[in-house]
Image (spheres, helix red, strand yellow):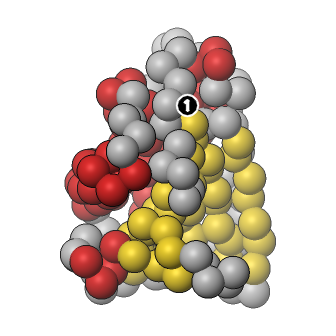
Amino acid sequence: MVIPLGPQAAEEHEPDGSAALGYRATWSPGAGRAADARRAVRALLGRASAVSGVPVNPLAELDAQLVANELLVNALRHTSGDCGLRLRLSEDGTELTIAVWDTSREPPRTQPPDPARVGGHGLRLVEMCSRELEVVPFEGGKQVVARLDLTAGDRATRR
């Protein structure tokens, strides 16, 4: 099930009662598409700039689309069950958290660099674009969480 990015789906209430812009989607096996993740990032960040007044660096927006794309592709490619995406923008509009969950307990592994290999470079790209990357196991699967700084233009300043 995909929840469209609308006024009700876009505002989430945190445990402390504060509201944050966010997005959630869940897909059954074979139904998810990476384009949905990229589209959700674009829509959320477009709304975020308007709401927070903090401009999102265009390179950071592209990186966020890439991270969401790669994490969802990994979930779709390497698991056979449901998967989902959660986007959450920090209250000040400077950080985006991208979380993708799936039904595999196997953590993703960064492959060694190999310019001759086709594929297998996605997680390395996610690491390069993210300020922080963590894998959180849970009963019945895992969640891969990436945090991105939306104001930094230079990847070297993000880590």
Quarter placement of the N terminus: bottom left
Indicate whether 117 appears above or below 40.
above
Q: Nearer the viewer, residue 18 or 89?
A: 18
Residue at 31 percent across and 69 percent down: it is: 32
- In the rendered image, the vertical position of residue 31 relative to residue 133, given as above or below: below
Residue at screen point 74% across, 53% down: 134
- Say which element carries label 1: helix
The answer to whether residue 64 is left or right of residue 146 is left
From the viewer's perspective, tell me whether residue 80 is left or right of residue 56. right
Residue at image x 50%, y 63%? Answer: 88
**134 above or below 80?**
above
| Residue nearest the observer in this picture, 75 or 19 | 19
In the rendering, at what x and y percent does residue 54 appear? 41, 40
Q: Residues within 10 Å of mark 1 (few under 14, many from 20)?
A: many
Residue 149 visible in image: yes
Disc 1 marks which residue? 129
Q: How many marks?
A: 1
> In this picture, is 115 found above or below 96?
above
Residue farthest front in this picture: 53
Work out which quarter of the rendered image holds the C terminus and state it: top right
In the image, 27 versus 119, the foreground residue is 27
Residue at screen point 70% across, 46% down: 133
Residue 139: percent from the left, percent from the top?
75, 86
Q: Is residue 122 visible?
A: no
Task: List x then y, in percent, for residue 6.
Answer: 22, 75
Q: Amino acid at mark 1?
A: Cys
- Specify the quadrant of the image occupied by residue 30: bottom left
